[in-house]
Amino acid sequence: MMEQWKEASDTKLALAVARFEQDALAEIYRRHGGAVLALARRILNSACLAEEVTQEVFIKLWRDPTIFDPERGSLRSFLLSACHSKSVDLIRSDSARRMREEREALSTVLRGGDFDRKIIELANSETVRGALNNLSDNERRPIELAYLHGLTYKEVSVLLINPKVRLKVGLEVA
């Protein structure tokens, strides 16, 4: 059966592929597969990836043989163009993936620094809380008003001295 396609033109072979004749696709691969594989290898610098790209090019032709238009050029140039496009897409997607992974790794490192800083802040806040608990109420209250309520030292002194101001601000002072 394969013998009938050996003398057929590429256009006839493409038409036969459109009728799902596997032998026609096998003949196209026999004629052009080596060139497609060589181009993919040269672009990708990887035999394994080149084989994948070559397979994808021929599968695409098998699934949709109408993508080849003999009026626009030869079947060989079509296959090589498809190979070039797939190879470049693969390089671009791999490059984009690597850049994305590098950004994520950098982000993780930076967030790790934030995590370390938060641990230190938590330890410091526990130390401060412990120190505040060791103070008397009269010593602790001005510090709480200044740091926890955001009052200035002058406002704290006015508030602690004048009971009428305490009521206006809405703070209770022990």
Image (cartoon, grey):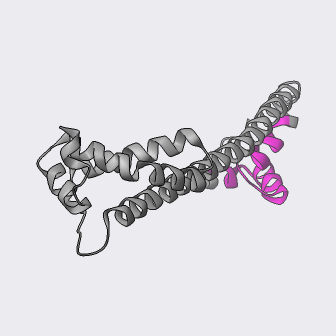
Return the residue nearer the eye: 78 or 169: 78
Please, is residue 1 above or below residue 5 in the view? above
Return the residue nearer the eye: 62 or 106: 62
Asked if residue 123 shows in the view, the reply is yes
Q: Residue furthest bottom?
A: 71
Asked if residue 93 shows in the view, the reply is no
Callout count: 0
Rendered location of residue 87, percent (x, y): 50, 55
Q: Is residue 104 left or right of residue 59?
A: right
Return the residue nearer the eye: 174 or 67: 67
> Is 143 a magenta residue?
yes
Image quadrant of residue 47? top right
Residue drawn at point x = 47 percent, y = 60 percent = 84
Q: Is residue 167 left or right of residue 135?
A: left
Q: Residue furthest left?
A: 19
Residue drawn at point x = 23 percent, y = 60 percent = 9
Rendered location of residue 102, percent (x, y): 67, 48
Image quadrant of residue 78? bottom left
For the C terminus, the quadrant is top right
> Is 7 a magenta residue?
no
Rendered location of residue 124, percent (x, y): 84, 33
Please, is residue 13 above or below residue 145 in the view? below
For the N terminus, the quadrant is top left
- Magenta region: which residues? 140-167
Residue drawn at point x = 75 percent, y = 52 percent = 159
Rendered location of residue 67, percent (x, y): 23, 61
Question: Which secondary structure type mostly characterizes the magenta part of the structure?
Answer: helix
Return the residue nearer the eye: 121 or 94: 94
Q: Is residue 135 left or right of residue 98?
A: right
Image quadrant of residue 151? bottom right
Residue drawn at point x = 26 percent, y = 49 percent = 6
